[in-house]
Image (spheres, helix red, strand yellow):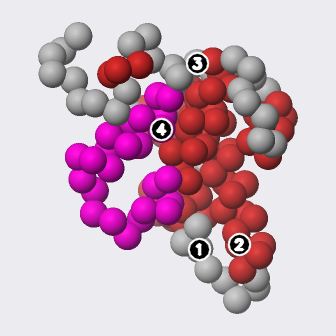
């Protein structure tokens, strides 16, 4: 997938009978940007220039952005502004899209609070329950592994 996206980002230069392609980002730059993005989103990036309060604020903001973007990729339809307002308030979600966003945010908070625990079937089920809370056709399937392919 990344290769396809990289190819789509190529630019071309035509020189008579030759067409050259180039990318603004080489593999090293893309890996470095990915590492920085991952660390910021995870709250692991530390800097002497950023105090603890600011680092926490950046971490929360990154988690909000990630929960919104992830939900939108899965079909949630709401604006980022409305979604952030929902996450900053204690109001209940008004629709399925807002529930998806709130659930994703809560799941990220859960994961962050349990980073030092080993990944276990129980933890996976708890994360699944959090992400699917109020969204499953059959609520009894929330937080459970499938036993068939349906």
Q: Which residue is mark 2?
A: 55
- Dot label at residue 36: none
- Dot label at residue 45: 1
Q: Residue at x 23, y 30 (%)?
A: 145
Q: Residue at x 43, y 11 (%)?
A: 137
- Dot label at residue 75: 3
- Dot label at residue 130: 4
Q: Which residues are magenta?
A: 110-133
Q: Is residue 80 left or right of residue 44?
A: right
Report how far apart the C-alphas of labels 1 and 3 lie in the structure: 30 Å
Report how far apart the C-alphas of labels 4 and 2 lie in the structure: 25 Å
Was residue 117 drawn as part of the magenta stretch in this picture? Answer: yes
Give percent across and percent down for residue 13. Answer: 61, 37
Report how far apart the C-alphas of labels 4 and 3 lie in the structure: 18 Å
Q: Is residue 117 left or right of residue 11?
A: left
- Disc 3 on helix, strand or loop? loop
Q: Are dots 2 and 3 in contact, CB under 8 Å? A: no
Q: Residue at x 67, y 54 (%)?
A: 62
Q: Residue furthest bottom?
A: 48
Q: Are dots 2 and 1 in contact, CB under 8 Å? A: yes
Q: Is residue 30 left or right of residue 14?
A: left
- Upstream in sequence: badge 4 or badge 3: 3
């Amino acid at each position: 997938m990344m290769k396809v996206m990289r190819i789509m980002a190529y630019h071309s230069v035509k020189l008579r009978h030759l067409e050259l392609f180039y990318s603004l980002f080489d593999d090293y730059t893309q890996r470095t940007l990915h590492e920085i993005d991952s660390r910021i989103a995870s709250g692991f990036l530390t800097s002497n220039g950023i105090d603890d309060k600011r680092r926490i604020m950046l971490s929360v903001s990154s988690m909000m952005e990630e929960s919104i973007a992830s939900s939108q990729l899965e079909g949630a339809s709401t604006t980022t502004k409305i979604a952030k307002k929902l996450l900053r308030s204690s109001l209940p979600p008004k629709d399925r899209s807002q529930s998806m966003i709130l659930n994703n945010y809560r799941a990220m908070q859960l994961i962050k609070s349990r980073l030092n625990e080993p990944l276990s079937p129980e933890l996976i089920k708890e994360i699944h329950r959090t992400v699917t809370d109020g969204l499953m056709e059959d609520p009894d399937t929330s937080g459970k592994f499938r036993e068939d392919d349906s």
